[in-house]
Amino acid sequence: MSTVKTSSMDLVGIGSAERVDRRRQSALLGTPLLVVGVALAAANLRPAVTSMSSVLGEVREDVGASVMWASVLTAVPTVCFGLAAVAAPWLGRRFGMARAIGLALAVLTAGLLLRIVDGPWVVLGGTFVAAAGIAIGNVLIPVVVKESFPHAVGRVTGIYTAALAAGGGIGAGATPMLESMLGSWRGAVGAWAALSAAALVVWMFGARHGTDGDTRVADAEPRRSLLRSPLAWVVTAFFGLQACGAYILMGWLSELFVSEGIARTDAGLMLAFINLIAIPLSFLIPPFALNRSSQSGWIAAVAGSSVAGVIGLAVAPTAAPWLWTVLLGIGMAVLPLALGVIALRTRGASETTELSAMAQGFGYLIGASGPFLFGVLHGVTASWTAPLILLGVVMVAQGVVGWLAGRPRFV
């Protein structure tokens, strides 16, 4: 009968591996530098989309692409957000939050550089790669907020969504100016890789997992799949509808204004303002709304602002374009509520990760249909009336479903 001898070095190796694994599963330390890292990471989750949409006409002309190609390009990010979101929880478990989000920023940087080097198919491919990095951050950063700042979810969510809006707004407003300075859309769009690279450097220093004693213990009781939860599907539909409306605006609003005779620079500024107006609202709304038992009233209010803005665009787009912009910008403040609802409708971090992946995975696939159908309707009808009717229906449905998602329950 043979005996198996285990050396002390083997035991040390096993113990070290277990400690590393536990460390990866622990929450990130909620330091001020982590807040900065979260904000910078969030600031990179929208410029990849808004920078391209603000110069979409020039891009399409330069690469010799059709309106249908432009419709696909505006839909690619949201499709990828949905597909890649499924992998995000696995990446978080496998590598830990610090490395997974760092990987997301690295992939984003690579995609931003790739899409400026060649023709229409490379532009689409690079956009898909960049969006894959964004998708991972979309799912995991709200989980970091809940895990690492459990007593300040509203405040840190406000910082996160304000940075998200700022990145989107600056990406839209600055890209046409960069194009004029650099002489081409490629340089202007590619310049945003510098921001994502800077965020990666800060994240590497600011994201640190806690000690073994800080490890979060997984739920012992087996849970049913969230796919069987009606509330989880309501939250998913709410997130999908807000994504649908937001990406229609980010993808097509600038072109709508330009086609109505507004200068491209001004149209870019209006698109930027829609995102930028959400910054103060992101600081003001979450601390109030997310500390209440119900968020339904807040969701209905911001959705109503969006509906009013869409009606203005449909009836008299050039009569008061800045007023319509303000109303739509207020409506964009639904995003922190959608992210907050994901955290508030769950009991623990593991449930939050699962619901975040489900809501964003399926939700962004729902959202992807919006920019595509909007562009197709515009191409088929050669007008903005039918596309704006579609956008209005999306905004109304968002308010109704959001009201249900905001009621105080758990999945």
Image (cartoon, grey):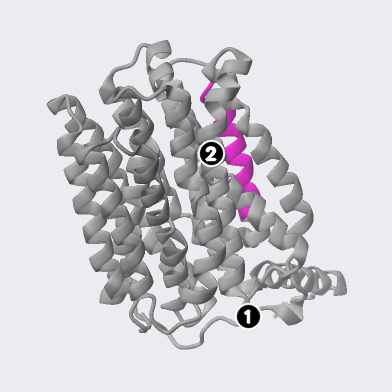
In the picture of the structure, the residue carrying the numbered disc 2 is 47
The picture quadrant where one finds residue 302 is bottom left
Q: Name the residue at 16% across, 24% down.
A: 382
Asked whether 116 falls inside the magenta stretch, the response is yes
Asked whether 179 falls inside the magenta stretch, the response is no
Q: Which dot marks residue 208?
A: none
Q: Is residue 129 visible?
A: no
Q: Which residues are magenta?
A: 101-117
In the picture of the structure, the residue carrying the numbered disc 1 is 151
Above or below, 61 relative to 99: above
Q: Position of residue 269 (x, y in %)?
A: 49, 34
Amino acid type at circle 1 is His
Kind of element beneath mark 1: loop
Above or below, 184 relative to 131: above
Q: Name the residue at 17% across, 44% down.
A: 389
Q: Name the residue at 64% across, 70% down.
A: 25
Residue 207 left/right relative to 235? right
- Among numbered discs 1 and 2, the one appearing first in the sequence: 2
The front one of 122 and 179 is 179
Q: CA distance from mark 1 to mark 2?
A: 30 Å
The front one of 219 and 18 is 219
Q: Position of residue 378 (x, y in %)?
A: 20, 30
Quarter of the image where the N terminus is located: bottom right
